[in-house]
Image (cartoon, grey):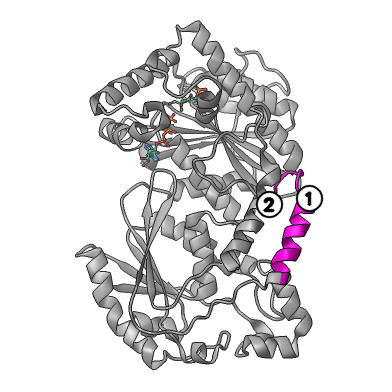
């Protein structure tokens, strides 16, 4: 997906409480899931570490020169971390999350990125829906470390509104008001270091998302990846809703531990299908729901009794095991011992002969994810490998851990959105089913761990999955990417031992 050497900084722009961090983490989760290196650099986290968390609104007053210098320093430390990150990973997308509310700040960022040969796309979230902003402050900002220990909600509301007022005083929307005529023939910025007067944002790449996407303005987008990011941003919304997942009921192939095929449900699988409508109606009440299934019999049979609109997706069909379709793991080990061993070494990348890898499944699921982002309540009835991929997207699981996730039969998972991520609740229906989970063999775990240790100290290809992460902070004296691969493999090991 990412052309070699592509390096983009998505520079967030917007007043406080406009969803910049929310958008940043959503975009990052999407790109990482697709295999793109991506990391969020949140300047607020740098500020909390460098200057402090509990600063009242006067710290954000543009007339407070000492604080203004400190804020610029935090912004520079974060930006330098962006450059160091690119030095280590070579290509990818850094999301630089701050208010970046003035032209001069944005010009400075553009100049610095040009020096490092990095593309810039500004992404502004503009919103004048006061009720929504109040809700954002009450639900998200009140629980931020900035207000730790403050019980008085009104005090938080007042202080945060004062903070917004300080930023509003100097705020300049991206692109300007568009009234100043372009000088004839001046359709491009000077190649290096335009003056502030020459810096006309109609010449730069930007997207403005207005009132949560009621209107979107796109300017001078040239690269494929930028257009993918924008398309994703156009599809995300903030309405409250739930996504439910379930594997099909136990199938006849599950009973024999066979891979793939298009079998019917087993007797216990049918019992699960009968019990499912009761659980779903308990979880959902009388809210509307749409059911998505694969095109295979076992998911359609599982969904049969659910009294909701249904839709079949070919993209939700189980991972294609190619030559191994219909075999058991033992058969595969006997007939194709080399491939069996290769799969254990790198299950995410392993592609069955004539079939698919987990990476292939992720890529074919991309339109499903995009549609899920657009929709309201959805229940997906699909298969073990496919649901692992979808679960990994929402729960921000590293790709190498994804193929070993436990998605048991006869269990419904319900996803609920939190400020910057998702929580999952699981509901098991008490009807017996076989266990189809096969753990990573210990020998393969050990080999992977020692390989990872031998490269520790190098930068990680994948970012930290923590959404409340501290600044990456090379500049803050903390180690950044280097330890990530070791951590992830240890997690894999713990999951499977
Ligand atoms: P700050 O500058 O103070 O860090 P922020 O702009 O990063 O604030 P967030 O922390 O991301 O704001 O705010 C999260 C809240 O914003 C969530 O409750 C989310 O529902 C809401 N939100 C998400 N997208 C938008 C949007 N486009 N406009 C307004 N609010 C949004
Ligand atoms: O609430 C605004 C905020 O997110 C602060 O937490 C953070 O210090 C600041 O924005 C970073 O943006 P800027 O560098 O523009 O002040």
Q: Image check: 268 left or right of 3?
A: left
Q: Is residue 224 visible?
A: yes
Category of crowding for the residue at label 2, using alpha-carbon neighbours closer than 10 angstroms: few (below 14), some (14–19), many (at least 20): many
Quick one: 485 or 137, which is closer to the camera?
Answer: 485
- Percent from the top left, x then y, of residue 27? 52, 46
**Do the CB atoms of the residues marked 2 and 1 lie less than 8 Å apart?**
yes
Q: Image check: 474 left or right of 337?
A: left
- Image quadrant in which the N terminus is located: bottom right
Q: At 66% across and 29% down in the image, what residue appears?
A: 477
Q: Element at badge 2?
A: helix
Quick one: 155 or 23, which is closer to the camera?
Answer: 155
Q: Which residue is mark 1?
A: 455
Range shown magenta: 443-461
Is 457 part of what is drawn in magenta? Answer: yes
Q: Which residue is mark 2?
A: 485
**Count the marks: how many?**
2
Outermost left residue: 286
Q: Image check: 361 left or right of 235?
A: right
Quick one: 473 or 359, which is closer to the camera?
Answer: 473
- Percent from the top left, x then y, of residue 225? 62, 47
Prevailing secondary structure of the magenta residues: helix
Q: At 62% across and 22% down in the image, what residue appears?
A: 76
Q: CA distance from mark 2 to mark 1?
A: 9 Å
Category of crowding for the residue at label 1, using alpha-carbon neighbours closer than 10 angstroms: few (below 14), some (14–19), many (at least 20): some
């Amino acid at each position: 997906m990412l052309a070699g050497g592509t390096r983009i900084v998505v520079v967030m722009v917007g007043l406080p409480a406009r969803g910049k961090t929310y958008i940043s983490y959503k975009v990052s989760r999407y790109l990482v899931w697709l295999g793109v290196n991506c990391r969020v650099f949140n300047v607020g986290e740098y500020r909390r570490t460098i200057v402090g968390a509990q600063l009242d609104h006067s710290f954000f007053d543009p007339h407070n020169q000492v604080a203004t210098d400190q804020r610029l320093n935090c912004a520079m430390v974060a930006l330098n971390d962006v450059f160091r990150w690119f030095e280590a990973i070579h290509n990818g997308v850094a999301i630089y999350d701050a208010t970046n509310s003035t032209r001069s700040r944005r010009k400075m960022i553009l100049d610095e990125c040009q020096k490092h040969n990095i593309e810039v796309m500004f992404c502004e979230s503009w919103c004048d829906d006061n009720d929504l902003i109040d809700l954002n402050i009450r639900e998200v900002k009140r629980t931020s470390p900035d207000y730790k220990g403050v019980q008085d909600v009104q005090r938080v509301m007042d202080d945060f509104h004062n903070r917004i007022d300080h930023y509003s005083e100097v705020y300049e929307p991206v692109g300007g008001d568009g009234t100043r005529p372009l000088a004839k023939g001046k359709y491009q910025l000077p190649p290096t270091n335009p003056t502030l007067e020459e810096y006309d944002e109609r010449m730069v790449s930007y997207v403005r998302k207005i009132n949560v996407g009621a209107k979107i303005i796109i300017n001078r987008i040239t690269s494929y990846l930028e257009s993918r990011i924008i398309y994703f941003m156009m599809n995300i919304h903030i309405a409250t809703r739930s996504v439910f997942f379930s594997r099909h009921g136990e199938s006849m192939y599950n009973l024999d531990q066979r891979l793939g095929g298009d079998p019917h449900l087993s007797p216990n699988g049918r019992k699960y299908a009968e019990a499912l409508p009761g659980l779903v109606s308990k979880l959902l009440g009388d809210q509307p729901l749409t059911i998505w299934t694969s095109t295979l019999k076992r998911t359609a049979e599982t969904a049969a009794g659910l009294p909701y609109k249904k839709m079949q997706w070919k993209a939700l069909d189980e991972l294609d095991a190619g030559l191994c379709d219909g075999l058991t793991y033992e058969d595969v080990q006997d007939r194709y011992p080399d491939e069996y061993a290769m799969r254990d070494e790198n299950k995410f990348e392993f592609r069955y002969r004539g079939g698919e890898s987990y990476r292939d499944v992720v890529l074919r699921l991309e339109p499903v994810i995009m549609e899920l982002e657009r929709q309201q309540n959805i229940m997906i009835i699909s298969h073990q490998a496919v649901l692992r991929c979808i679960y990994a997207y929402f729960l921000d699981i590293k790709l190498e851990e994804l193929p070993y996730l436990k998605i048991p039969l006869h269990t419904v998972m319900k996803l609920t959105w939190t400020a910057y991520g998702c929580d999952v609740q699981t509901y098991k229906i008490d009807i017996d089913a076989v266990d189809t989970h096969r753990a990573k063999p210990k020998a393969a775990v050990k080999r992977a761990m020692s390989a990872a240790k031998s490269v520790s100290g190098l930068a990680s290809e994948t970012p930290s999955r923590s959404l409340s992460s501290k600044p990456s902070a090379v500049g803050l004296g903390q180690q950044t990417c280097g330890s990530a691969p070791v951590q992830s493999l240890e997690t894999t090991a713990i999951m499977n031992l």
